[in-house]
Amino acid sequence: MKLNLPEKLYYSIGEVAKAFNVNTSLIRYWEQEFPIIKPTKNKKGNRYFTPNDLQNLQIIYHLVKEKGYTLDGARVALTTNSKISETVSMIDRLQYVKAELLKLKDSLD
């Protein structure tokens, strides 16, 4: 899943939810369920996510939404499989290559 976000130091919860095409409540729920997601909060309590948080959310999204893991299963996979982030990044790159090849095919037709 390629996220369409500009390069920034911090992202609001609305930007993150829109990038993943989910509700903000789901992002807040995942924050409670997975200790690897630790957004910074300002005095008002607004959450700001770092690029590292986005990578962790992308892994969780892949496991839960795309692979169909339960939350407990995703939590176990995150703790036991040290190469999960490499796997997710490889899948992203392959999906990008596939999309580019499909564009090329369409332009040839």
Image (cartoon, helix red, strand yellow):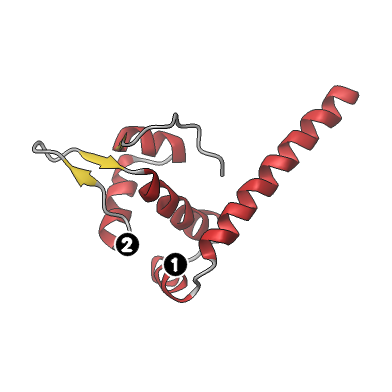
Q: Quadrant of the N terminus?
A: top right
Where residue 11 sits: x, y (%)? 33, 35
* Local SS, label 2: loop
Where residue 62 sits: x, y (%)? 52, 55
Taking the image as shown, residue 45 lies to the left or right of residue 47, namely: left
Q: Amino acid at mark 2?
A: Phe
The residues bearing labels 2 and 1 have C-alpha atoms spaced at a distance of 9 Å
Where residue 96 sits: x, y (%)? 67, 40
Taking the image as shown, residue 80 lies to the left or right of residue 67, namely: left
* Local SS, label 1: helix
Question: What residue sits 45% from the left and 32% below the top?
Answer: 5
Position of residue 74 relative to residue 55, above or below, is below
Q: Which residue is mark 1?
A: 74
Whether label 2 touches label 1, CB < 8 Å:
yes
Question: What residue sits 47% from the left and 71% below the top?
Answer: 77
Dot 1 alpha-carbon crowd within 10 angstroms: few under 14, some 14 to 19, many 20 or more: many
Q: Which residue is mark 2?
A: 34
Dot 2 alpha-carbon crowd within 10 angstroms: few under 14, some 14 to 19, many 20 or more: some
